[in-house]
Amino acid sequence: MGDQAGPEPTVSVQRDLRLLEAAGAHPTGALSQQLAREAELPPAMAGEHLRTLAEDGYLRELDDGAYALPDQGPSPGTGPGPGPGIGAWTEHVRPLLTSLRDGLSAAAYLTLYDEGEIRVLQIVDSPRAPRVDLWVGFEDAGHATALGKSVLGGLDEEARANYLSRHPLADLTSHTITRREELIRELDAPPMAPLSMDREEYRRGTTCVAVRVYSGDRVGSLGISFRSDRMYRTSEVRAQLLSSALRVTRRLTIPD
């Protein structure tokens, strides 16, 4: 899994927000070139983002090729609030996890760092793509999972230190990293961006791959799990995870 890192999902969503802000200044719509200038983005990049925003329902493409905000809907950028409402709110992203599960024939997971803990918000599996047995609570296993390591890699130094001070690096399998220095080296190593992995660190016989997602300025992770004896092409897993992470981040940051 040594692919080179591309832009994180949050970078693309920041571009989306700039284009949405520009479109909001033109109630009757504006052409791609004008929105690109106002958002200070290259025309080709802006055009690609505008088309995706229109496909996902965040913009309307008018008959003359201009783009405008939808007629109704909440303002962008609010994201879900803390507490119990998160789970219900993230039902909006469940179809994206279902698509990821079906595309890779692997169970899909979504987490969010909330009030100092890595919380599992969604798991989408099936008989052909079963979820991993969560035999140890996720709050005690962030260091041993790709999902947890992806989140920890996205925290600032203070938040990460706070988390690690409250969560011992329990030895879950013979592959689990239990030395803090080794874990931090892995979290900060270039191959960790954008993908994180655990190879039987949480449960023997199971491998997990994850990538960071964001809800506004809050970090989370999107990942898959599969039997370690299954073979996947790295490029396929990387492409599908990054594409899904961008859409999940967009959905979490820019409400419908």
Image (cartoon, rainbow, N blue to C red):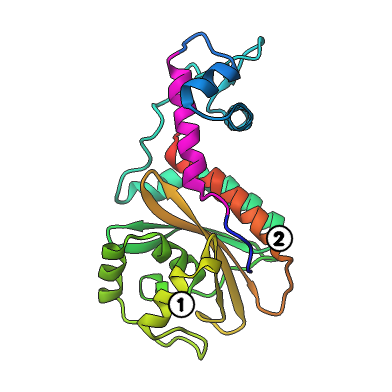
Is 202 left or right of 114, judged from the image as shown?
right
Q: Mark 2 or mark 1: which is in front?
A: 2
* Residue located 43% across and 40% down the image: 253
Secondary structure type for disc 1: helix
143 drawn magenta: no
For residue 71, above or below residue 96: above
**Mark 2 or mark 1, earlier in chain:** 1
**Picture layout, residue 46 above or below residue 81:** above
Front residue (pair 1, 227): 1
In the image, which disc is placed on residue 144? 1
Residue name at image x 45 percent, y 47 percent? 90
Q: Is residue 37 above or below residue 207?
A: above
Quarter of the image that includes the N terminus? bottom right
Task: Please name the residue that numbered disc 2 is placed on.
Answer: 235
Residue 209, by quadrant, is bottom right
For residue 14: magenta?
yes
The Cα atoms of the two marked residues, 2 and 1, are separated by 24 Å
Category of crowding for the residue at label 1, using alpha-carbon neighbours closer than 10 angstroms: few (below 14), some (14–19), many (at least 20) = many
Q: Secondary structure at mark 2?
A: helix
Q: Main secondary structure of the magenta part?
A: helix
x then y, percent, for residue 206: 60, 78
Question: Residue 202's x, y, as percent?
Answer: 50, 79
Amino acid on which disc 1 is placed: Ala
Q: Quadrant of residue 235?
A: bottom right
Q: Describe residue 205's horizontal placement relative to residue 186 as left or right.
A: right
Q: Residue 191, image x and y in percent?
A: 55, 68
Span of residues in magenta:
6-25
Mark 2 Cα-neighbour bin, 10 Å: few <14, some 14–19, many ≥20: few
Which residue is at a point 37% across and 81% down the rendered structure image? 181
Amino acid type of the residue that numbered disc 2 sits on in the rendered structure: Ser
